[in-house]
Image (cartoon, rainbow, N blue to C red):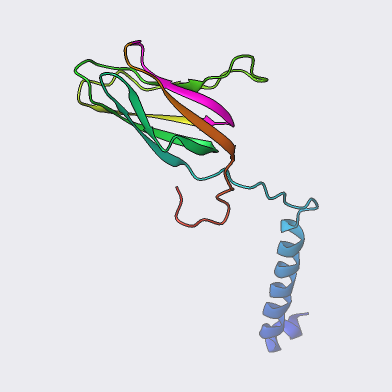
Amino acid sequence: MQAILQYRPELVRLALAIAGTVLLATACGDTEPRSNIPRPPAPITVTAAVRDDQILVSPAAIGAGPVVLLVSNQTRRPQKVTFETDELGASSGGNTASTPVIAAGGTGRLSIDARSGRYAVHVRDRTVRAARVTVGPRRQSSQNQLLLP
């Protein structure tokens, strides 16, 4: 063995490299296949304006998935906007999200994972008519979309 080390050090290095490669290849393997769970749909932004007599929402029909609602309070009073299911006797429990109190002339934001159904966007002040939003089938996965957060 000493004779090999003295005259053929490159063989020793090659043998060590092969042994290391075999060790790494066997240690890193996994016996179960990786399950590829699709990412959720990319969030969409919906805008709302709270006026003295009504709330306007655009667009009023969207697909199910993550929604960010940007709200402009165009009244002279602070408002808290709520986005919630508008279905009596639905098969599953309600889905609700609210903004913090939005100052007069200010803006607010809420996020919700909306599922299919009808929703109402309203404030506590009953003189302001609520807006209706229709949420259709789930939007496509964002699995292959680049540059998403």
What x and y, as percent, mark residue 92?
65, 20
What percent of the width, then of the height, locates residue 53? 29, 19
In this rendered view, identify the residue nearer to me: 70 or 133.
Answer: 133
Q: Nearer the viewer, residue 33 or 36?
A: 36
Q: Quadrant of the N terminus?
A: bottom right
Query: Considering depth in this image, is 43 or 49 the residue closer to the camera?
Result: 49
Decide if residue 40 is on the left or right side of residue 71: right
Magenta highlight range: 113-126
Does 53 sit above or below residue 32? above
Q: Is residue 40 magenta-colored?
A: no
For the point 76% across and 67% down, the residue is 22
Left or right of 98 on screen, residue 114: right
Measured along the vertical axis of the image, is residue 121 above or below residue 1? above
Q: Is residue 86 above or below residue 140?
A: above
From the viewer's perspective, is residue 14 above or below residue 56? below
Name the residue: 39% across, 32% down. 69
Quarter-of-image position of residue 139 = top right
Residue drawn where x is 73% and y is 74% of the image: 18
Q: Quadrant of residue 77?
A: top left
What residue is at 52 percent from the left and 56 percent from the top? 145
